[in-house]
Image: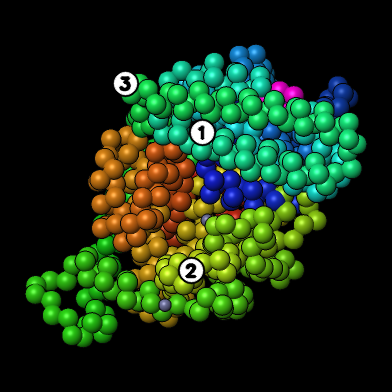
Amino acid sequence: MNRRVQYLRLYLRRIKLLFMIRKFIYFIAISFIVSCQSGTAPTESGVETLSADVRFEHFKESFIDELWKVYPGWATLSGYHKYDSILVVPNDAFRSQEIDFTNSFLDSLSKFNIAELSESNQTDLRMIDNLLRGNLFYSNEFKEFEKNPSAYNVGNVFAEILQYTKVSLDERMQVLYSRMRNVPQYYEAALSNIKNPTLEHTELAIAQNSGTVDAVFLSMMKDSLKKSGLSEEERKIFTNRLDSSVNAIKSYIDTLKSWVSQKDRQWSSFRVGKDLYEKKFTFEIQSGFTAGQIYQKALDRKREVQQEMLKITKEIFHKYFPHVRVPGELNLEHTKMLIDEISKKHVHRDSFQTAIERQIPELTRFVEEKNLIYLDPEKPLVVRKEPAYMAGVAGASINSPGPYDKDGNTYYNVGSLANYSSEGAESYLREYNHYILQILNIHEAVPGHYAQLVYSNKAVSLVKSLFGNGAMIEGWAVYTERMMLEAGYGNNEPEMWLMYYKWHLRSVCNTILDYSVHVLDMSREDALNLLVNEAFQQKQEAENKWKRVTLTSVQLTSYFTGYTEIYEFREELKKKQGDAFKLKEFHEKFLSYGSAPVKYIKELMLK
Ligand code: ZN
Ligand code: ZN
């Protein structure tokens, strides 16, 4: 616990998204699916054989059962709470168990003839195959467990269990008590695993594990203990174990701090390098392109978008700055001036949520009027203020019930601006100005993430709901932004297009930045220059992005990669089908496969 749990924690944004997705898709019992299919077929000898799909459904069921046994922490974070009391010690024995599990399921998988399976099962098979091969790559080649001290942190799963209110508090305390047993061995194993850490991940590990001690163990756990019905005696025993856990985490932190204070210590580079980067991209993004190809496409797109922005600048600059004299040609600096000026048009801080609420039906109406995609009126989206437990980061996100929590609602959480100073609120509102707010709603809700998830829900597959392809999901949301504007949303106002391009450049430059830093050795200075001067980002935003790229790799490319694959595929199909091409049909068919990688959807649609 490993790469998976760490992986989830590191890519905070992605977690948030995957979490939403997991929480969204309704889980229909496997038995139901099985009963819907052809079942058994008699052969000539009269012996009945199970159809490939029936066998595959059983395979998937046992695969997921075993997966949760090997990765109980991952199960907890996915909303499956059977193994909450087990904390896996990430030692050599665990890693060989992991490899055995992987090889055994790869072997069973190889016995299926993919051509005999339904389309949905074909993509499920390839997704499981990718996950297992990825496992081998992470264990044998990428070896994050040797490089990344922040891969070790027990905090998030403890916090998740504490917040799982379907189980009584006293029961949760029992579970947590059992779970704490392995905390000391967990951190001992961590220290013996780490061989060549990076400074960046070491510092992150210090900060995050300190948060685990203070926020999870010393406050959440102790508060819960007070509220629980445990006896005096039980509380004592619980507190003893809690103290040993805290000591183990603190001693881990102290060791890491002693490394940081060694002046002549040699750290590994956070840069992944070309070979590992390409491979990681293959497993994580599952694109039809290589990372190098996507990088080239992002460079081209950046140039194209900047040219379009310049065109708009020439068109409307003097409307906003009638008294500014420009010697010579207008350039990107003028574009930046224009963006800053147009950003001043925004809603009042008190009406941020109502503005979003009002926009959803407008977007829905536009989508219906233009015949872009069918939206199911039976699945309404509830806009609400971000609940307290999610608070801290103002923003917007979709939160939906996961496969193990099928009765939950789907919410659009809107961050509160209540705790912002007036400057803070102003800066936030300029960022999410009149134009960007609409693009954000397209992306998050209609016809972006929310609409996609409604379709994904209909394509019932536990595999896709648990391991849905992030590039397809993000790519769809990014694709819909452009699709909506091309369909005339915003009346082709130049301001709307300019703001769209600024927003879009963020996805494009995420890809350029990630590849440049990890493969081409880009310096911090050049990175900030790219984000601030070429993508019009605020300095603070650019610095946060730099920090993120030193701690993660590949994930930042998912938005642009998915978008590019969907957009190019659509254009290809348009050319092929000519007048027969219908946008609405394309969208509905595309989404009907669930959250599978775009390359597989494409293959099935072209058949
Ligand atoms: Zn203002
Ligand atoms: Zn998104």
**Front position among marks 3 and 1:** 3
| Magenta segment boundaries in residue numbering | 179-183
Numbered label attached to residue 421: 2
| Position in image of residue 326 (x %, y %) | 13, 76
- The spot of residue 95 in percent (x, y) is 61, 18
Q: Which of 452/173 is in front?
A: 173
In the displayed structure, 426 sits above or below 293; it is below
Instruction: Indicate which disc, 2 or 3, sits on the residue closer to the N terminus.
Output: 3
Q: Quadrant of residue 516?
A: top left
The 10 Å Cα crowd at callout 2, few under 14, some 14 to 19, many 20 or more, is: few
Decide which of 389, 517 is in the foreground and name it. 389
Where disc 1 sits, the SS reads helix
Q: Pointer 1: what residue?
A: 205
Residue at x 53% of width, y 28% of height: 253
Which mark sits nearer the N-terminus, 3 or 1? 1
Q: Secondary structure at mark 3?
A: loop
The tag on residue 37 is none
The residue where tag 3 is placed is 264
For residue 22, side relative to residue 145 (left or right) = right
> Can residue 383 be seen at all in this image of the molecule?
yes
Q: Secondary structure at mark 2?
A: loop
